[in-house]
Amino acid sequence: MKRRLQVMKFGGTSVGDASCMARTAQIIAQAARQNACVAVVSAMSGVTNRLIEAAKRAGAGDGSHGAVVLDTLRKQHSDALQALVNDESTRKSILKQLDEAFAEGRRLLEGTALLRELTPRTLDAISSLGERLSAPLVSGALRELGLQSEAVEATEVIVTDAFHGGAAPLMDATRAACHVRLWPLLDKGIVPVVTGFMGATPEGILTTLGRGGSDYSATILGAAMDAGEVIIWTDVDGVLTADPRLVSEARTIPVISYREAAELAYFGAKVLHPKTLNPVMQAAIPVWIRNSFAPERSGTMITPKGQSIGGGVKALTAIQDVALISVGGPGIVGLPDVVGRTFSTTSEVRASVLLISQSSSQNDICFIVSAADAQRTVEALRKEFAQDLAHEKVEHITVDTNIAIVAVVGENMRGTPGVAGRTFNALGRENVNLIAIAQGSSESNISFVVEEKAMKTALIATHREFKLDAAEPRSAAGSPAATK
Ligand code: ADP
Ligand code: ASP
Ligand code: MG
């Protein structure tokens, strides 16, 4: 008989040091005693940033920084191993695994420095090393607790396209790979600890899913294995009404719909990678967000249908690392295909467009992309419109990075008049200047662009206006199997 399957993902802070890893292992062990359980882990917190920095410096010809970073990481991981695993032979075999990853990292960084060229493919191979180091440690901690466990590299189970730095999963192939690699382990009672963040093309070339992508790894596996639920363990109590680092009054939302959570993630709520919910929506697999530092709390449940609340507004989010690009000038009035050419260019460079606004005079098309996509988007647009710029049909392509998007999210805003008016009044009272506004036709979000320095004020004012700090009752929606 197949037991219910839980996929559990642990983020960087949940595996941040040996004591966090030990707590994580306890959570997995408790769940694995009742259900079949697949764990997905991120790199220890801060490790991916350090690896990316090392890769970039190597790409600029710095031949020594990478070695220093790898030495520090080796010490950090072997210290954690020492603290977590007492059994000598387990420790030895894990250290061997770690050293293989370090040797590969060393070769990649040296080669990059020698060539002074960092390709997206090499960056993926270097930036994903952190997950390949943390998974064997968590697996070792589980064995220390008496469970059978094996660290599995996601290159063996998540099959993706070849878009390095933001690969998309190929679900049929992933499903087949899970049958070959993960189900046999579960059938033998072995808990797989899978590296988050990465996958591989059908040819076996390592790819990554994008920064923060381990959430996505968990739901990809959850969907591919028909899991009963996916639990994302992190360092906050769940999805909150706003980022608690910006709004101290933010509180945990007990139940939220896929659509609402997806809107929040899309507009920057870091607690979820923007694509996290895509794989599980069709099969309606519930996703829980829970606090690995307070596992007794039940967290947030993300379900197909959320729970309605009075005011309609459920949560706020803001995104800072964005750029406003405008393509315009009076000359574009006579160019009917400017919109089409602009957005086929953004799609060619795979820039994700977060918000679009066009003035009625058609003098300007403004849109917002994430800051990481801005440079290549502008370069591609300048190329696309080179002739028009030369003939001044298009006068300018400009970028402004000193802006932020604030989004007001809630499915029940549909049919609740006055949400936009109340938001703008609240912002007006605080003298926050609105640069652009957009409302999705689904009416489950209203987003507005403000100057970056006004973002926090805008969030606090809107949070107060909609009384989002008031307690919301937990419904009878249930609790995750792990706590039953
Ligand atoms: P992990 O390492 O577990 O993946 P992240 O740092 O990626 O964790 O995401 C969790 C963080 O997301 C929280 O510490 C919190 O600061 C931030 N965050 C932003 N918006 C929200 C929100 N609406 N609800 C909860 N957390 C949020
Ligand atoms: N370690 C990766 C990152 O920092 C993936 C993740 O944490 O989800 O982006
Ligand atoms: Mg994250």
Image (cartoon, rainbow, N blue to C red):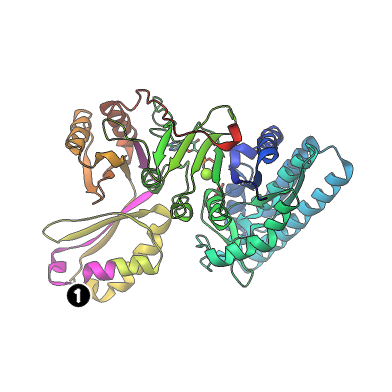
Q: Which residues are magenta?
A: 315-342
The residue pinned by badge 1 equals: 391
Residue drawn at point x = 42 percent, y = 42 percent? 269
Q: Quadrant of the C terminus?
A: top right
Vertical comparison of 199 with 115: above or below: above
The amino acid at mark 1 is His
Residue drawn at point x = 48 percent, y = 41 percent? 271
Residue 245, image x, y percentages? 44, 31
Decide which of 293, 367 is in the foreground and name it. Answer: 293
Vertical comparison of 126 with 391: above or below: above
Residue 420, image x, y percentages? 20, 38
In the shown orientation, is residue 62 left or right of residue 288? right
- Farthest residue to the front: give it: 1
Residue drawn at point x = 27 percent, y = 30 percent? 310
Vertical comparison of 465 with 3: above or below: above
Residue 117 seen by the camera: no
Question: SS of the residue at dot 1?
Answer: loop
Q: Which of the 4 quarters of the picture holds residue 454?
A: top left
Decide which of 70, 251 is in the foreground and name it. Answer: 251
Residue 9 seen by the camera: yes
Residue 258, image x, y percentages? 40, 46
Residue 365, image x, y percentages? 22, 60
Q: Pointer 1: residues within 10 angstroms few (<14), some, or many (20+)?
A: few
Q: Is residue 324 magenta?
A: yes
Q: Which of the 4 quarters of the picture holds residue 425?
A: top left
Q: Is residue 19 magenta?
A: no
Residue drawn at point x = 51 percent, y = 66 percent? 163
Vertical comparison of 476 with 15: above or below: above
